[in-house]
């Protein structure tokens, strides 16, 4: 079988390197790494010229610069940065603290969370691959809101913990070994730039949603512990049934049986999102735990899932 | 200066070993380790006979067996287990799944959280040293309830993370290196046996309180992220002022300035509890982070703080 | 294509679980897990009855009990324990401190280090899969001795470091998280039971070989730092040439260029053995670093490599 | 008691911060942190003007710039860098790849390994605090050479492993969490700049000594595994007796009984060097394990030990 060649810009970062690794197992696609630092963006775009599909594992400002050139050259794009995830330039400048320079593309981009946005992805020229925290959060929260089981007056709490690879490969004191090992800390409390993606997909209002990001002393994995009060008296089985029905046929969502809580080892190096629930029916307290590998379902794996959809391959190709 | 001799039963466990280490720096007290496994409890009690103060770093059932004998021999006791923390035998059997065999002592015991129960400790024969999770939780939550700033209809969420030493030194698959490293997992969701201690001291009702315990891949430290909605429009400074006023003069509580979030490195090997707050005044969302070393303020250090009170020493002796 | 079914006894241990995982990617073989603990060995042998190939990821005494029954039933066996690795019952009882109960099979077994013993493996009924430390050591040392470049009067030092999974999955204090994290320790200095396997394959005498095993605070990986004095004046390139010539065509040995030293990340989750050298020609001091994943090339991966040879498949099938 | 004030330049690095922490427990000395980055070196020297003792926890080039000014102002100095450890400018430029700018001070400086150089320290104006690797190595090796038990034709192998804090606090990819966790790697094989310090104190020739530095995935601690062949038939007890006699009365050296091997937990946060031996009398193979905390006995603790000697205090003051 002839291989399709997929370009990867930003292959040195953790997400880009994971893309190279994961594509190494894909039966129909071969990775071509493109360097945007040793040449200027125009050159990278030129080298990517004939490629049917290109992954941008670059910072948002680089993605905004490269995207129009590569689209003009006829490539389809999957952007792993936050550049094209939000719906409006205003939202982008509020959360990313800079002006959006490609507003037409922002309007055009399809949000690449297949479990909720699958229809638009195959026809899209530009897919915005979701953030890692939002992937774990939306897969857990959206079915709850759709089913109307959340007491929205009290809102939802999402206590999120991530491995250090989520902070990228650029050296910094905050991610240096001695500062992280045997430590644990919160950051961006209530104001993480991934919050608007969660609101956008889940349907929550900002006032209904409390989100804390925290740094785990591990390399990879995101676990989110999600709390809410039920709108009516329901039990764990009712909640599980909501997830099971919503995710029937979804190849990458695993709903745990009652009493079983996900952990990070089970999802490491996989494209799965594991979901488990605990409910105290008498008092209406509910806890949902959602776990992914931030570099796979939270980045490179989901990007390949989107590529499969865009190129007309089986959605799980190279991912199981 | 002559040293007082303090007995330590259960010195092989992590809390007991930490007691030995910490007492090594105490200027007035010398530790005598007593073994309850190589001899029967009566012998341990006999060997402890003349000691003015004995620490029980033993499982609850051993503490219940040793306590009456040692009290009868004239020792004052500080029990680090859960045996004497709850108020009623019924609560004990509900949460610890066994019958309480020393109901008189349960009624007599003073709860050893000095910041809230300091008056009863100096005169007590038996002090129940608080659990690690409840120490971090109550120090953060109780002032909020006293000040009336919590919207109790929505309750409080406490997302707690602990280092592995909190699970004790007995080998088990769950605490073995390969299972814990590069992992993170929740356990006892909504039903941890430390919950009733938090309700007892904070004044919360069970239906108002959602608590999840989680295992961090580190040896020591507890960080709790606490979420609530404010009962009225207040900001971070209002909340900080509540803590500062409540803890003025308290030697072991450090309230962080606004915008600064505690982490575990800062409290490791210390008896401090660090508290930081984030509030979004417009929407009423509030997050409090509380951090301690589970073996020090969550066990051995707080036990020595209690000992200082019981023996009439300065409360910080040997702890700064 | 029809799959061959391979039995795995001892699938709960770390090596057995890795076998299940690795076989999940093998295009011709499907794994069937067999439990030797919930039934007696006869039953496990019976259930394995018709299987063409069975992996024993069991302690040596269980392997000695199961092997004759399973061979009698017509299965080919790959034993991951130390039961059939040494050449004589006397050597076995010296190093394993127990009598060998299957001396005929000990004589019959082929040692499964393909790079040095490939001829006997395809025709063998019983293959003794090498130990993890000996795999990394022999691949580095044997070519040196064959080439005559070692000053044998001074011998060879092998300073070996292993991740904790090498100690097995059974909980113990020595492998519990709090004892291992932020620690490093040596064990079985000069008397590790893997020493005779290294002598047997490398051709060294015991007096020529100093070996220390050490526990790294990581889950998987073995790195061995090997020191010797050169018998004549040679440089790094001479040494590399010896390795390159010896391992030309070997799919799982990667010889690093001069000045580049292997590490564990590069071999994690792979069947590779990475080798790097440093030589000071003027003084004759030489250092060779050898790195493998102890669960893959040091256990499950090498076992599958042996299976491929025994079943007539391409040697790398399912392993790249 | 009035406190002496000790200046600390470079207090932000890991060694400097450890000095601040350790001096916090010293009964006679108070630390004053001096910043050499926010001001020019002349200013730092000026601010340090009246101080009786100053610690330089700075890179060698900064130490060379500050030392003459501070000595001229009347301070005694303890330099934690490599600037003043070697005996000749030639040796310095060979190993540190730069010219020495203070050759008179290099000649004047006393090497601060009290166990072997105690006489010169009290009267010195400038003490060169030993490197971390050399401290562990020389304490283990020198007594062996003095006693003549090493077969020097075969030389000594020192396989050294260090926690990441030894690489300093400046962020780099090599010391970032994701690169270090679950990894292990060697660096500077046979050419680490600490080698000449080991030769200088131990009396070994370079051709007799093979040294490899390696990075452990832990924050602090150095363990060195040292191999040699005995010059005559001796056993473990003979070797232990050499150490015990040599270190009788030394407060910071702990010689382990035969069969007991040091680990890093036992020395963490202490100024101890633990030494253990294994010998196979029949073949002459010997292994010595030496363990220290690289930030304490390998840096800040030893610096305070030197300060105690320079100021006429008991050598262990503030260190036990």
Image (cartoon, coloured by chain):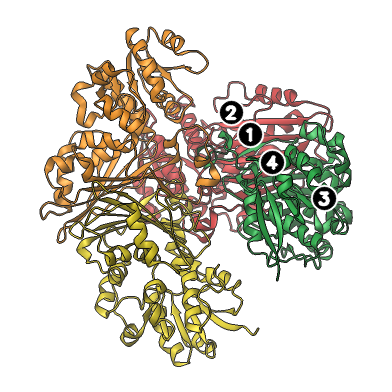
Chain colours: A green, B red, C yellow, D orange
Label 1 and label 4 in one chain: no
Q: Circle 3 sits in a helix, a strand or a loop, which is it?
A: strand
- How far, Cα to Cα, is label 4 from label 3? 28 Å
Residue under pointer 4: A213
Q: In terms of sequence position, does the residue under pointer 4 or pointer 3 come before the other? A: 3
Task: Tell me the tag on residue A126.
Answer: 3
Q: Circle 4 sits in a helix, a strand or a loop, which is it?
A: strand
Q: Circle 1 sits in a helix, a strand or a loop, which is it?
A: helix
- How far, Cα to Cα, is label 2 from label 3? 52 Å
Residue B68, x across and y down, in percent? 47, 48
- How far, Cα to Cα, is label 1 from label 4? 23 Å
Q: Residues within 10 Å of mark 2 (few under 14, many from 20)?
A: many
Q: Residues within 10 Å of mark 3 (few under 14, many from 20)?
A: many
Q: Nearer the viewer, mark 1 or mark 4?
A: 4
- Is B223 on the left-hand or right-hand side of B67? right
- Is D247 on the left-hand or right-hand side of B74? left
Residue A17, x across and y down, in percent? 62, 51
The chain carrying label 2 is B
Q: In terms of sequence position, does the residue under pointer 1 or pointer 2 come before the other? A: 1
- How far, Cα to Cα, is label 2 from label 4? 24 Å
- How far, Cα to Cα, is label 1 from label 3? 50 Å
Label 4 and label 3 in one chain: yes
Label count reads 4
Residue under pointer 2: B253
As displayed, is residue D58 above or below residue C48? above
Contact (CB < 8 A) between labels 1 and 2?
Answer: yes
Residue at screen point 42% across, 7% down: D46
């Amino acid at each position: 079988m002839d291989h399709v060649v997929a370009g990867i810009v930003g292959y040195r970062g953790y997400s880009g390197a994971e893309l190279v690794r994961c594509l190494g197992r894909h039966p129909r696609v071969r990775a071509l790494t493109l360097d945007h630092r040793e040449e200027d963006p125009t050159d990278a775009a030129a080298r990517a010229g004939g490629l049917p599909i290109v992954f941008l594992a670059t910072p948002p400002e680089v993605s905004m610069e490269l995207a129009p050139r590569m689209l003009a050259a006829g490539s389809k794009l999957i952007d792993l940065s936050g550049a094209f995830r939000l719906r409006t330039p205003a939202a982008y400048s509020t959360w990313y603290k800079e002006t959006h320079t490609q507003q037409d593309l922002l309007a055009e981009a399809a949000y690449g969370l297949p479990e909720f946005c699958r229809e638009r992805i195959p026809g899209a020229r530009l897919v915005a691959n979701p953030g890692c925290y939002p992937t774990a959060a939306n897969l857990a929260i959206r079915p709850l809101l759709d089913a109307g089981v959340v007491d929205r007056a009290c809102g939802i709490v999402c206590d999120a913990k991530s491995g250090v690879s989520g902070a990228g490969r650029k050296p910094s004191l905050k991610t240096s070994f001695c500062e992280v090992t045997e430590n644990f800390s919160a950051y961006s409390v209530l104001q993480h730039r991934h919050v608007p993606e969660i609101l956008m997909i889940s349907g929550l209002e900002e006032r209904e949603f409390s989100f804390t990001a925290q740094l785990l002393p591990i390399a990879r994995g995101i676990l989110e512990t999600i709390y809410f009060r039920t709108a009516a008296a329901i039990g764990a089985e009712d909640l599980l049934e909501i997830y099971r029905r919503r995710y029937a046929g979804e190849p990458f969502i695993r709903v745990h049986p009652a009493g079983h809580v996900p952990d990070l080892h089970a999802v490491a190096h996989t494209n799965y999102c594991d979901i488990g629930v605990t409910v105290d029916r008498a008092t209406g307290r509910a806890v949902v735990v959602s776990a992914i590998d931030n570099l796979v379902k939270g980045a490179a794996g989901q990007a390949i899932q989107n590529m499969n959809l865009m190129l007309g391959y089986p959605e799980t190709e190279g991912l199981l």
